[in-house]
Structure formats: C-alpha cells, structure tokens
Image (spheres, grey):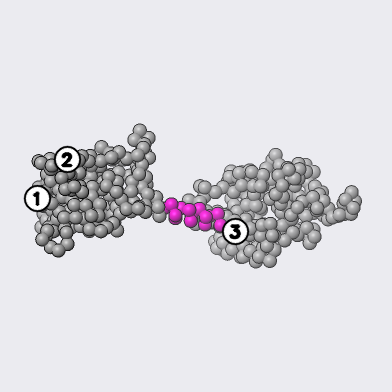
Amino acid sequence: MSPFLTNNNNAMKLHYILLLIFPAIGAAFVPRSPLGICYDAARLPVQIVQREAMPKDKSEQQQEPKNLFNTLRKNLKTAASDGFGTRARNVADTMVIDDVVVPLCSNLEKRQSLAQRGVYPGVEYIICDISLDVGKQDERAVSIRPAYPLREYLERSDWPITVAVSDVPLWLSKATYEAGTALGTLMLSGTYLSIAAVLASFIRIAVVPSESMEPSLIPGDIVLVTRSILPPKAGDVVFFNPPKELDEAIANSKVGRAAAAENVQVVSTKGKQFLKRVVGIPGDQVGVKNSNPFVILDDDNTYRVDRTGQYSRPDLFPEESWNRITPTINTNIHQEVDSTRLARGEYFVAGDNGFRSVDSRVWGPLKQKYIFGTAQWIIFPLNHFGAIQSGPFVVEESLGSN
C-alpha cells in the first residue's frame, strides 16, 4: 500500500507538489506500493475525497501549505535522528499504544506470509494494544488496525489483528516513513531531470520546414539530431543556427534593399534553425560553377560536384553567388591567406534542392560555432523511417558547363 493514502494526506500532497514542480516526471513516475499495487485519484480513500470536497475558507487554504511544510520539516528532523532505509531505527521496542507505525519487510516470501495475516508492509497501522505473546516465550505482541481505509479486497472483518513484534523485521515511525518517501520522490525527480538535461544537451528532434533538402528530406519529416562530437564530414546533414552572414545576405538582396527603401521589416531568421548538407570541410578548395558547389580534389584534375541546381530567383542575389572560385563572396584572392580554401572551423553547406535553398552559395562558409549537430535518422513518418540518404554528389574530371 502507498504512504500517500493516509488520512492526514501530507505525504500525498507533497508528492503532488513535486510533480507540479517537475511535470515531466509525473508521467514517468506513479507511486507504487511494496505489494506492486498502482494507485490513481479515482481510488483514493472515501474519507480523503469527502474532506477535499468540503469548502474551505481562505484562512484554511493559506494555512494548508504552511502546515504541510511544517509537518514535512518536523518529519525530516525526526527521520534524520532515526535514519533512512535499512539504517532507519527500528521502533519495535519503543512503540506504545496509539502510536502510528509502518511495518516493512524486504523478503518476498515473508511479506506474503504477513499479508495473509493482515500485515501489509508499507501501510500505516495504529497500535491498539500491547501484550505478551505467551506462545513465544512472553515476547511482545501488538494489536493493530490500519490508520486509513484500505481497498475492499484488503479489508478484514477481524480488525484489530494481533501479531508478534518479532514477526515483522522492521517497524518504522510514521514520520520516518513519510520523510523517507518524500526524499525518495525528490531524488527520483532529480534523477529524471538530470537524465532529461543530459539528453537535451546531446539530442534534438527537428522538423523539416521546407523543400530545400528534397528529395532526401521533405517538409514534415521529423529527424533525430545528435550533437557533433567529431567534426562533420562531407555529405553529412548538419543542424545549425542561422549565421549573421545569412541575415546580411538577405538584407543585401533585391528583396532586402526594396524592403529597406519602403521601411518594411524583412522576416528575421532569429530563433530558426536549418538543415543543410556539408559540401566542403576545412582545408577544401571550394567554389561555385553555374549554381553548383564544387570541391577541387587532391590531384587537382578532378572535382566533386554537388549538383544542387539553380535557385528559383537567382536575380535576387549577386551574380558571384552562382559563379566563383572562392568559398567566400567578395574575397580578394590575391591576399596572403589562401582564400580559395575553407579556413579552420568553416564548412560550405548547401541544400540538396538548390531551386529552393538559400545556403553557402549566397552567404559563404558556415562557422563551426553555429552547428549543433548532425541529422542521423528520419524517425517519422514511418514510411520515411531510416537513415538520411546521400546527397547529389558526382566526381568529374572537368567542370565544363555543368
């Protein structure tokens, strides 16, 4: 049975407060009894339902949280002196009539035997009488009854029942049991929060918003993204925040300049995230020929071409967006730094469907700091489930007219 079903209901209220603080934990954690029974609100004791149904004035409502935490603080203080878990102090020798105690037993066979006699580990019992058990060499025996109504199939007609104190391995005070249960709930909540935080740091779920990555990814596909630990490779699909160069390219486009002239705000990319395929990595010689990005391979006689295709409105952006021999737009190729190669931490990215993609062709290299991770799998819809297919790369001996 659950410690959350007491008539004073303090532990249950604390549990619900914790679940309000950690809402995601509520779905994952449902209090279970040592007997493996799961409880829900519809099966709470009648007395509790009736008490909560009674109207309360404002002073009672204001006092209730204060009383709850005062009780919890008192219980924790008591439990601190009594210990927790297997180190908790056994009150078998000190309990007196009218005490509320909780029997516990870790041995499954012993627990089943006690349950058949009406002693349910984890249930709060009121001690009605203490006597000597003549059959056990004058050992102490207690007459007990549950402190609150049980489920119908656990109720007995012979309450209170008498049991030898030594038959139960551990007797806990109510304060110790409630404090231990509350602390356990808090620790479990913290564990789930920690796991969720770690997962959120390394895993993202992204929805494909546009046609820029067709046919590999189509709008509405849901993909699993993992944080990049190793640097992205050519052909990887990366998930990244928009670089400042993208906003600059939009502002300098025909649409951006026309909007500025009319004092109209262009749609911002702030807060959005994108998926593009890596064409070139640091150290690669990258350029664009007839809208198709290319990488000069090691022997200088072959090229890896990303046949992404022409943008739907090439006139919106400068001509060099679609034809140049450098990864960066407006770069002086006569400067000391080799501007035909991607610098450290720079990647050239493009959409598989260049007709609908604004990418590195327009705004230049993507810096590593903007990249969250790599898209690995399509996880929904199920008819698209699987690894993301490779991009439209081809190796050619000459760029020709592409």
What residue range appears in magenta?
187-200
The residue carrying mark 3 is 183
Q: CA distance from mark 2 to mark 3?
A: 66 Å
**Residue plotted at (36% across, 36% down):** 385
Taking 46 as reference, is 246 left or right? left
How busy is the neighbourhood of tag 2: few (under 14 within 10 Å), some, or many (20 plus)? some
Instruction: Give the amino acid at mark 3.
Output: Leu
- Helix, strand or loop for disc 2: strand
Looking at the rendered image, the disc whose residue lies closer to the viewer, 1 or 2, is 2
The residue carrying mark 1 is 319
Position of 112 relative to 267 (above/below): above
Helix, strand or loop for the magenta stretch, by majority = helix
Instruction: Give the amino acid at mark 1.
Output: Glu
User: In this orientation, does residue 117 appear?
Assistant: yes
Image coordinates of residue 389 in percent, x first then y, are 30, 38
Q: Which mark is residue 147?
A: none
Taking 386 as reference, is 316 left or right? left
Q: Compare residues 318 and 114 and report the one nearer the observer.
A: 318
Q: Which mark is residue 396?
A: 2
Instruction: Give the amino acid at mark 2.
Output: Glu
Image coordinates of residue 283 in percent, x first then y, are 23, 55
Q: For residue 132, what is the image quadrant?
A: bottom right
